[in-house]
Each structure stands twice: as structure tokens, then as C-alpha cells.
């Protein structure tokens, strides 16, 4: 019974972690789409700045120092958009450039929680048949075994020896 339960936990862990490569791929696609949209918005901002004969920073500064609170708020929103483009570009590059077996680390370092939630809501499981998914499956089996051990204890049932019975 204990071996069957251990095997069940291991297989469940393997099934869950084997999905990481597919989730990563779907997350990266979603991040790329959002990055493309942010780039379009920042390019339009850069055009407006250029038409006024200013750099983007000088253009934003005019919003940020304006006495009207609505205009200052718009300046802050535009400045955040420029910062978001930089952060998303860095994250996308890090995820795209990460080698297969270091993707989990890159994902942990650069994950955007909003994008991860959106990815999870739309996630479609897959059965990836790659070396990467095999590694994650093996790690998942180990994690499942550890969870089993933590929940039910590691001790083995010892069979009583003839002296102990008697």
C-alpha cells in the first residue's frame, strides 16, 4: 500500500512538472504579444515627443511638472509604460536566451504575475516528448516522493524478527 501511494505521488509530481516546458512556451508567447503592444505604444509616444521637438524624457517631464493633476497622472502613466517596455524587453530576452535546462530559473527571476495568471487561465496541457520534459518529469517524480515522505513519514515498516515476536 505504501509503495503504491509513493508511486502515485511520484507520478502525479511527474505529470505536473512535465507541463512546465509547455507552460513556459505559452507564457513566453503571451509575454511577446504584450511586449509587441507596449512597443507600439512607446513608438507612438516617441513620435509625439519628436513632433514637439523633444526627447521622450523631456516630453514626459512637461507632463510630470504640469500643475494640472490629471496631466501629471498621465505623465506618470506614460513614464510607467516606458519602464514596462524596458522590463518586458529584458524579461523576454532572458527567457528566450535561456537554455532548456535553465528556463525554470529564468522564469522564476523574470516572471510577471499578471501574465502568469493569464497564461494559467488559458493554459492547454500538452504531452511534450523532449529531453527537457523528461528532466522535469523526473524532478516531478522526486518532488512527489518528497511530498509523500513529508505527509506520511519516511520510516519503513519493520518486520518483527523471531526474537522480537517471542
Image (spheres, helix red, strand yellow):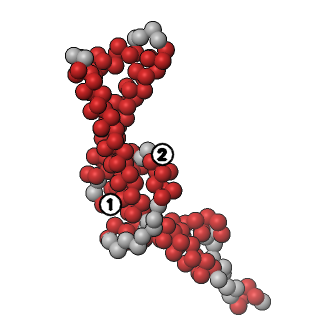
Look at the numbered disc 2 and give the secondary structure of its residue. Answer: helix
- Residue 55 versus residue 36 in the image, above or below: above
Residue at x 50%, y 51% (from the top left corner) = 117
Q: Given contact means CB atoms under 8 Å apart, are the residues at marks 1 and 2 in contact?
A: no
**Separation of residues labelled 1 and 2 (CA atoms):** 22 Å
Q: Position of residue 134 (x, y in %)?
A: 37, 71
Closer to the observer: label 1 or label 2? 2
Q: What is the count of numbered marks?
A: 2
Give how far across and how far down residue 37 sits, in percent: 34, 42
- Residue in the foreground of this view, choosing between 12 and 86: 86
Across and down, in percent, residue 135 comes to 37, 68
Let me know if residue 141 appears in the view.
no
Q: Secondary structure at mark 1?
A: helix
Quadrant assignment for the C terminus: bottom right
Screen quadrant of the N terminus: bottom right
Quarter-of-image position of residue 91: top left
Q: Is residue 10 left or right of residue 158?
A: left
Q: Earlier in the sequence, mark 1 or mark 2?
A: 1
Which one is in front, 141 or 159?
Answer: 141
Which numbered tag is attached to residue 101?
1
- In the drawing, what numbered circle is on residue 148? none
Residue 69 at x, y = what percent? 49, 14
State the residue at coordinates (64%, 68%): 153
**Label 1 crowding class (10 Å Cα cut-off): few <14, some 14-19, many 20+?**
some
Residue in the image at 25% along x and 27% along y: 47
Residue 165 shows up from this direction: yes
Q: Residues within 10 Å of mark 2 (few under 14, many from 20)?
A: few
- Name the residue tied to disc 2: 113
User: Residue sitting at 34 percent across and 48 percent down?
Assistant: 33
Which residue is most to the top?
A: 67
Amino acid at each position: 500500500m505504501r509503495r503504491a501511494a509513493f508511486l502515485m505521488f511520484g507520478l502525479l509530481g511527474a505529470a505536473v512538472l512535465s507541463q512546465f516546458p509547455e507552460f513556459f512556451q505559452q507564457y513566453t508567447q503571451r509575454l511577446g504579444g504584450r511586449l509587441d503592444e507596449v512597443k507600439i505604444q512607446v513608438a507612438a509616444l516617441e513620435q509625439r515627443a519628436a513632433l514637439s521637438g523633444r526627447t521622450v524624457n523631456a516630453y514626459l517631464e512637461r507632463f510630470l511638472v504640469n500643475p494640472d493633476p490629471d496631466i501629471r497622472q498621465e505623465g506618470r502613466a506614460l513614464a510607467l509604460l516606458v519602464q514596462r517596455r524596458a522590463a518586458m524587453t529584458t524579461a523576454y530576452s532572458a527567457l528566450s536566451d535561456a537554455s532548456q535546462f535553465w528556463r525554470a530559473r529564468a522564469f522564476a527571476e523574470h516572471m510577471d504575475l499578471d501574465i502568469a495568471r493569464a497564461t494559467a487561465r488559458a493554459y492547454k496541457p500538452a504531452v511534450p516528448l523532449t529531453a527537457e520534459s523528461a528532466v522535469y518529469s523526473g524532478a516531478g517524480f522526486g518532488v512527489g516522493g518528497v511530498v509523500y515522505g513529508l505527509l506520511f513519514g519516511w520510516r519503513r515498516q519493520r518486520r518483527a524478527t523471531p526474537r522480537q515476536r517471542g
